[in-house]
Amino acid sequence: MIAVGIPTTDVNSETAELIKWYVADRAAVSEEQPLAEVETSKAILDITAPADGFVLHDARVGDQLSLAEPLAFVFASVEELERHVADAQVAVAPSSAERVTEPARRRAAELDVDLDLLLRRSGDLITTAVVEAAADPSPDSEQPLPEPLAAPPGIRRIALIGAGLGATQVLDILRGDEEQRTIAIVDDDPKLWGITVADTPVIGGVQRLLALRAQDAVDAAIIAVGTSVPARVRLREICRQAGLPLANAIDRTARIATGVQFGSGNIVCAFCHFGVGTTVGDNNFISAYNSFDHHSVIGSNIATGPGCMTSGVVKIGDRCRLGTGIFIEPHVELGEGVRVASGATIVASVPPDHTVKTRHTTTVVVPNRQ
Amino acid sequence: MIYARALGQALSDALGGDERVVLLGEDIADPYGGAFKVTKGLSTAFPDRVRTTPISEAAIVGVAAGLALAGYRPVVEIMFGDFLGLCFDQIANHIAKYEAMYNGQATCPVIIRTPSGGGRGYGPTHSQSLEKHFLGIPQLKVFAASLVHDPSALLSRALGQAAPVLHIEHKSLYPLEPLARSEVIGTVVDLAGGDAPPTVSIRHVPRESCAATVVAYGYQAEIARRVQARLALEEEIFVELLVPAQLAPLDWEPLEASTAVTASLLTIEEGTSGWSWGTEIAAEMSRRRFGQLRRPVEVLASAPEVIPGARDLERRVLTGEAQIEQAMRRAAG
């Protein structure tokens, strides 16, 4: 496929008008054959075919064409042309993107709000406030919210944020903790209010947590949202503003070597290993069987899947998201916001905001033999 | 229909609807149809009343003044706004003064249309926005073309009054399509301006949720509108954009009403900074809303430098999307 542009050095014009087509759409053309006539503010030009082939019009007579954009394409074969047309039709699927802000889209995913319903209900811009109002439609519900559990004096009172699967993991980790006790769970989905997760009550939304903090009824929080890095970042900021410290939840089977430094708000699942001199930032969710060997530096707001292994002196930047079963060679540095597909073996550093993909999949699914 | 065509159509309607309308300017007749093709086809349709003139801006505007005093409705095209300097005396000392000097017994309703602005690499003398030097001349109205005002309605408003009008048309607007109001998520409303054409208000959420008021005209209003939409959709930074069609005298009511809620104001223009439209607005609004704004009025204008010809250098000097985005973030902060 060759794009056909408008060849001009005319600095007076940024557009040209398409006056007429010399050849029909999809017709066969030969190299140098005139395709169309266009007019800039200074001159009328003939546009010729760059090669033999079949032409696809990409403009209509009377259009103002940008001098930087093609007005037609020439394909070597009819089949190639047809494929291009079919692909282009798939690409221009109608979208409601312009009606929903990006933060609202993320919030709707967190709160499990049906955006299509909101879009049908209103012609206005869908903002975070609209999504949150839709998620919390019942300020009139008279059900009293449950109270947090009690804790003996001297035991740190912990509230979990998020009542999903992440919470069950954190509750399990803290079960054997003699210094901290989970007294409550909060979640912004009102459908969960009043239920218990492993005997711990869901007492309301994040606002309730902030109110409890103001009454000095809770000492620290743990963000129990495993998979969404943006949600972890947002909730951490809410806690910071409310002066609510984040506690670490580290499974008692984790092996923590000499000189390891932990920030706050980290969740470390079973059988993890932190090698000598490793430092860990804040607000990370480290799944089971992760191993960060000696003198590695783990940033903040990171989420990993099970079985991620690094060699020594590896750096993992803030907001990284690692899949399952990943190996990282010594001295490799992952920049901020890097995402790594499951099964990757990383031998070289990755710049910020890039994604590491695996080139091949090793899973082949076949029917069972009889 | 692109803006240049819409303007040409408005001129065609005016010529067809009023025998007194005449068009004068350099190279405006067919087949050239004007440097930016606005008048294309008009000399063919109205050969007696659409005239190409010699290269003398002072003479063109002087002739227009005489025609207006004699009862015609002349519409002049000055090929580039930079050449307004050549007709400054005719405008400031004659056209704008006649009505008052003759105590209303004579009027001089000349409309002077001219393309302004840079961004196309035309260099120091074909890229400027000199309109700030014409703001505040008593009895002269300065209009600015925009994609949110109907060019036909603006032109008939100008033709229907006795005061002379300088009609600034940023050249980057010519190939653009006017804004389809139905495509804006939120509200686009005309705020009636009494004697002045309406100021258009664009916002994506109710005014109470807007963190700043932004006022811009011409092509800068179009860039501001794109930045406004992007910040709203990507980050929920909401501002109200006000686009006046008449720069001077300015209708203060929309600015007062909006800043009463947002308490923050940003002005945007492409002319050079200092002694400008924005500084005048800043002075006046600081007086009208003394002590009620949460931050000083932010005035965004181009660097006070001669505009370079090389496009990358030009981009550093002129007010552009990056500067507008930064200023909008500051104003909303």
Image (cartoon, coloured by chain):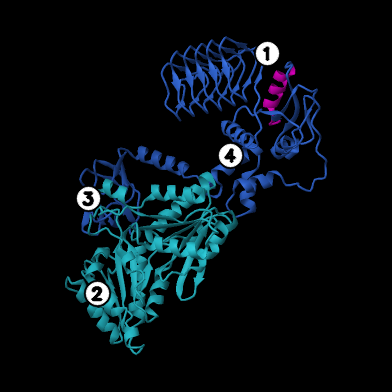
Residue A162 falls within the magenta-colored stretch: yes
The residue singled out by tag 2 in the image is B89
Q: What is the crowding at mark 1: few (fewer than 14 residues within 10 Å), some, or many (at least 20)? A: some
Q: Is residue B109 visible?
A: yes
Residue B74, percent from left and from top: 29, 79
Distance in Å between CA atoms under marks 4 and 2: 60 Å
Q: Tell me, by letter, which chain the rendering colours blue.
A: A
SS at circle 1? loop
Q: Label 1 sits on what residue type?
A: Arg
Q: Is residue B52 visible?
A: no
Distance in Å between CA atoms under marks 1 and 3: 71 Å
The residue singled out by tag 3 in the image is A8
The residue singled out by tag 1 in the image is A252
Residue B100, percent from left and from top: 35, 84
SS at circle 3? loop
Which dot, 4 or 1, sits closer to the camera?
1
Q: What is the crowding at mark 3: few (fewer than 14 residues within 10 Å), some, or many (at least 20)? A: few
Chain B: what color?
Answer: cyan
Q: Is residue A79 above or below residue B13?
A: above
The residue singled out by tag 4 in the image is A106
Distance in Å between CA atoms under marks 4 and 1: 34 Å
Q: Which chain hosts label 4?
A: A
Q: Label 4 sits on what residue type?
A: Arg
Pointers 1 and 3 in contact (C-beta within 8 Å): no
Q: Quadrant of the N terminus of chain B?
A: bottom left
Residue B131, percent from left and from top: 32, 65
Judging depth in this view, the residue of A51 and A196 nearest the camera is: A196
Query: What is the magenta range?
Result: A161-175
Which dot, 1 or 3, sits closer to the camera?
1
Distance in Å between CA atoms under marks 4 and 3: 45 Å
